[in-house]
Image: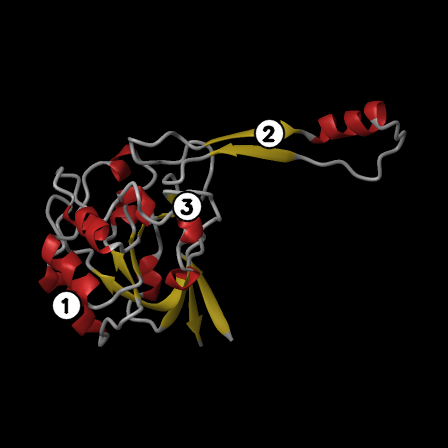
Amino acid sequence: MAEFIDLSQEIYHQHPVYFAHPDTIVWTDTTFEDSEYIFKNQAGIDEPTFTYESRTFQISEHGPSHVDSIRHFKEDGTPINEMDLEQFHTPGKAIDVSHCDPDGYIELEDVQTALEETGQTVEDGDTVLFHTGHYNRTYPSRAYNEQHTGLTEEATRWLIEQGVANFGIDQPSPDNPSGTYPCHTLCTEYEVPHMENLCSIEKVVGETFTFMGFPLRLRNGTGSPIRAVAKVEE
């Protein structure tokens, strides 16, 4: 038997999103009463055997738990619908860096120490998840989209050199919002995707698991919402 751990934040009307992206807006486009009226008055069915309700979502590619495609970083980069799906179904590693200062950075030493504490190594093709604790501390308050820690250039470069397929974090960005964005810059240079706005990563720290987080097939997508899941074998 396997246990599936949901690492995705809920998607709902006006959930917290990064300030540069539009709010998620949800509205009911057809109510049960609407559908009953349609069946009776437009389809001529006196006693409908069922009625239905449906909703419509306005949502950013980068609003909820999501992955950035290479097209997000560079104009001629690979869009989400053309990226290799193997990058979103990999062995997973999760580490705890929640001690790192929200006003500072996750240093390479923090990453390596966290791996040593769980007896893990980062292998080629892994997805690495960072539990910073930011989601647990601040969500869903306004503070969630304000100050948080971020990976240094050295820590990001080391991850990329290990051959990671993907990596993710439980905050709006893997970069500290200081304006330098070393993580995004290196992801652009080496064309490595990453995931933002995850949650519950602490549940799989040190565990052996398979990561799954498939994107939607959005034509020319700069990113996509994902359902991020860790499959833990019992």
Check disc 2: other Cα within 10 Å, few if <14, some if 14-19, many if 20+: few
- Looking at marks 3 and 2 on the same chain, the residue that comes earlier in the sequence is marked by 2
Residue at the disc numbered 2? 28
**Left or right placement of residue 73 versus residue 15 in this view:** left
Q: CA distance from mark 3 to mark 2?
A: 23 Å
The image shows residue 93 at horizontal and vertical percentages of 30, 67
Tag 1 and tag 3, C-beta contact below 8 Å: no
Task: Name the residue at 66% across, 29% down.
Answer: 30
**Mark 3 Cα within 10 Å, few/some/many (few <14, many 20+)?**
many
Q: In the picture provided, is 214 more to the left or to the right than 45?
A: left
Mark 1 or 3: the one toward you:
3
Q: Is residue 222 visible?
A: yes
Q: Nearer the viewer, residue 148 or 151?
A: 151
* Location of residue 202 (image quadrant): bottom left
Residue occupied by mark 3: 224
Q: CA distance from mark 1 to mark 3?
A: 30 Å
**Which residue position is annotated with label 1?**
112
Tell me which residue sits at (41%, 45%) in the image. 224
Name the foreground residue: 152 vs 73: 73
Mark 3–mark 2 CB contact (< 8 Å): no
Expressed as whole percent of the image width and height from the top left, the position of residue 80 reads 40, 49
Q: Position of residue 23 (x, y in %)?
A: 39, 30
**Residue found 17% across the figure and 73% down from its top:** 116
Q: Residue at x 31, y 44 (%)?
A: 76
Q: Nearer the viewer, mark 3 or mark 2?
A: 3
> Cα distance, mark 1 to mark 2?
48 Å
Give the residue type at disc 1. Answer: Gln
Q: Amino acid at mark 2?
A: Thr
Instruction: For mark 3, give the secondary structure.
Output: strand
Whether residue 226 can be seen here:
no
